[in-house]
Every structure is written in structure tokens, then in C-alpha cells.
Image: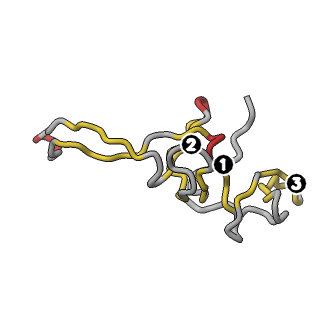
Amino acid sequence: MASIKIKRNDQVEVIAGKDKGKKGRVLRVIGEKNRLLVEGVMMMKKHVKPNPQRNIKGGIAEQEATIHISNVMLIDAEGNRTRVGTRVEGDKKVRVSKVSGNVIPEKKK
């Protein structure tokens, strides 16, 4: 199993599927299934039962579904789609954009 090079809070662009061309932020990475939850991408309708105890109204809600990691590409600081490589700088291993060669900064949670 290959390592996942996309992390939470990264900006990604969908390159395949019904949402091709959409950009969004990664909300969750599901490593064992190689899938991502991306904000505003793969919107699905879900039927929700009303639950007065939790103050939930019933109806049809829209929420994101997961998308396979092969269908997205990372967007670097310059706004280009890029593949991700790694490089050792000092004693730290950093992610690097294959297009520009720049280091991809770690986002704070």
C-alpha cells in the first residue's frame, strides 16, 4: 500500500468524475480505503429522520461523500496542480511540489 501524500486541510482539485474541475479543502483522510472527504465535492442527498431529542428536523440533507485519492491532485502555493514528492531538509522530511520544486507548507489545524 502506497503512502498517502495528501493531508487534512490541503487544497485539492478534482481531476476525474462528475465533479471534475472543482476545488476544495480536504476535511478528512481515510487511509485504509485510500479515500478523501473534500469540502463541496461529491455532494449526496441523505434522508434524515426527525429526532426531537437531538433537535434534528427530518427531510433530505446534502452532505459530502468520499472520493478516491487517485481522482484528486494537490494545489500548490502558486495555484498549480501538482504531484507530491518528499525531500529531507536538515533533519525534517518535507513535502515538495513536483511542478515548481517548492516546499509545501504544513497547515496548522
User: Looking at the image, which residue is at 79% across and 56% down?
Assistant: 94
> Horizontal placement of 70 versus 54: left or right?
right
Dot 2 or dot 1, earlier in sequence? 1
Dot 1 or dot 3, earlier in sequence? 1
Q: Secondary structure at mark 2?
A: strand
Dot 3 or dot 2, earlier in sequence? 2
Q: Which residue is mark 2?
A: 29
| CB-based contact (under 8 Å), mark 2 and mark 1 | yes
Q: Residue furthest bottom?
A: 78
Q: Secondary structure at mark 3?
A: strand
Q: Residue furthest left?
A: 52
For the N terminus, the quadrant is top right
Q: Which residue is mark 1?
A: 6
Compare residues 76 and 8 and report the one nearer the observer.
76
| CB-based contact (under 8 Å), mark 1 and mark 3 | no
**Residue 101 point in image, percent of width and height:** 85, 63
State the separation of the CA atoms marked 2 and 1.
8 Å
Q: Which residue is mark 3?
A: 88
User: Looking at the image, which residue is at 62% across and 41% down?
Assistant: 69
Compare residues 66 and 6 and report the one nearer the observer.
66
Q: Amino acid at mark 1?
A: Ile
Specify the color scheme.
secondary structure
User: Looking at the image, which residue is at 61% across and 34% down?
Assistant: 34
Q: Amino acid at mark 3?
A: Val
Residue depth check, mark 1 versus mark 3: number of the one nearer the observer: 1
State the separation of the CA atoms marked 3 and 2.
24 Å
For the C terminus, the quadrant is bottom right
Q: Amino acid at mark 2?
A: Val
Position of residue 33 relative to residue 72, above or below, is: above
